[in-house]
Image (tube, rainbow, N blue to C red):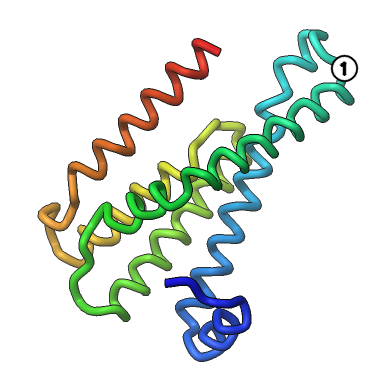
Amino acid sequence: MPASFSTFLAQAVENPALTLSALLTLGVLLVNGWTDAPNAIAGAVVTGALSFRRAVLLAAVCNFLGVLCVTSAYPSVAETVYSIASFGGGPEAASLALCAAMGAVVLWAAAAWWWGIPTSESHALVAGVSGAAAALEGDLSCIRWQKWGLVLLGLVLSTALGFWA
């Protein structure tokens, strides 16, 4: 359901859970940038394969191309994340569970960044959403395992394509 930015802002004012979700999403994006950019160029700079300036330029170009690729696949990815689990307990319980999951993702990502552990915030988000749904339902029957299969397939394919490239 597309909505304008002004509609989003009006709904965010009325719904604190939406505001918190949006802030947590921005936190995930910020931490993701903290972790991805340095990891992408560290090896090339330390080994002397690229100067710092060229490595940063290459990272900027590749990150921009990555955004273009993700934008083209976004509807499919968003649908997978959205439908990875079914939430019971109504919209308010689902909103609280999602906020808790996203908060955990932000904390996990920040802790991993602090200790220099490479992570995938998108996979952590999928796990957090699944965990939130399971906590609401009390078991794993709410998890849509076929969607989890798509996430795992994407993880395997992206790793294989990265090694190939």
The C terminus - image quarter = top right
The N terminus - image quarter = bottom left
Position above or below: 62 against 25: above
Position above or below: 73 against 107: above
Please tell me which residue is depicted at 76% across the width and 35% down the height of the picture: 60
Camera-side residue: 36 or 72? 72
Q: Which residue in the structure is indicated by mark 1? A: 51
Res 102 quadrant in image: bottom left
Camera-side residue: 130 or 9? 9
Please tell me which residue is depicted at 29% across the width and 78% down the height of the picture: 91
Please tell me which residue is depicted at 54% across the width and 82% down the height of the picture: 12
SS state under label 1: loop
Query: Residue 134 in the image: x percent, y percent?
Result: 20, 58
Of the residues shown, which amino acid type is indicated by label 1? Ser
Camera-side residue: 56 or 20? 56
Dot 1, crowdedness within 10 Å: few (<14), some or many (≥20)?
some
Position above or below: 127 against 37: below
For residue 108, side relative to residue 49 (left or right): left
Query: Residue 44 in the image: x percent, y percent?
Result: 74, 15
Query: Residue 127 in the image: x percent, y percent?
Result: 34, 47
For residue 79, side relative to residue 37 (left or right): left
